[in-house]
Image (spheres, rainbow, N blue to C red):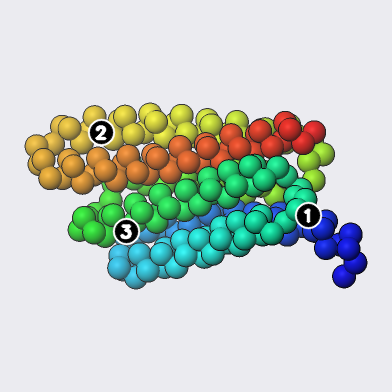
Amino acid sequence: MGFKEWIIPQDKVFFDLFDEMAAIVVTAANLLVEFIENFENVKEQCYRMKHIEHQGDEITHQIYEQLNRTFITPLEPEEISRLASALDDILDYIDGTVQQMYGYGITETDAHMVELAKLIQLSAIEIEQAVNSIRSIKDPSLIEERCIEVNRLENIADNVLGHAIMDLFKTEDAITIIKLKDIYENLEMATDKCEDVANVLSDIAIRHT
């Protein structure tokens, strides 16, 4: 390897890792929808989700390791760090909510949970498309469109959360209220984390055009 190749890494390393991470977020979101819609073999599904979350942690670790030993990066180091952290946060909230449902001993899911899970899934798909586009930003408006859609989905999730809590407080079981409120709020928080990723991607698109 020549000196030039040693100090100037291939841009594709970071982009490959981000593509992998975005794909894992979609996989986790798909499993979340399956988990909440069917709500069978809960313990086994929790193990599956934890395995996916660990895969995401490993990729995040690789991104930071690569960042620490790279002199020249295709994006600003802060952008790489922010994007890695934001993607990892989505996974953490998806996995955390699934583990919480198991730990709380939830026996059934409801329409509000399904709707929130599907909003997370749709957001993850938009994010994957936007992440795939930062490798070569020829038209920033394409990334911006994906980011605007994620913001729109997050706004819908806010409304779903509001209706879910209104319905919840019509019940009188205090323990159930506490448990379900936590779950609703964490599902909605996952959409907030998707919006955080969209904001990072939007900044990247603007700065690198």
Above or below 56: residue 194: above
Q: Is residue 71 left or right of residue 26?
A: right
* Mark nearer the N terminus (2 vs 1): 1
Residue receiving disc 1: 11
Across and down, in percent, residue 203 comes to: 66, 33
Q: Residue at x 24, y 29 (%)?
A: 166
Query: Can residue 151 be seen here?
Result: yes
Q: Which mark is residue 19?
A: none
Residue receiving disc 3: 99
**Mark 3 residue type:** Gln
Q: Is residue 96 left or right of residue 79?
A: left
**Mark 1 residue type:** Asp
Which marked residue is nearer to the observer: mark 3 or mark 2? 3
Query: In which quadrant will I find the N terminus?
Result: bottom right
Which residue is at the front of the view, 123 or 196?
Answer: 196
Q: Residue at x 51, y 41 (%)?
A: 194
Give the SS element for disc 2: helix
Which residue is at the front of the view, 11 or 179?
Answer: 11
Contact check, label 3 and label 2, Cβ < 8 Å: no
Residue receiving disc 2: 165
* Mark nearer the N terminus (3 vs 2): 3
C-alpha span from label 3 to label 1: 36 Å
Q: Residue at x 27, y 55 (%)?
A: 101
**Mark 2 residue type:** Ile
Across and down, in percent, residue 143 comes to: 69, 37
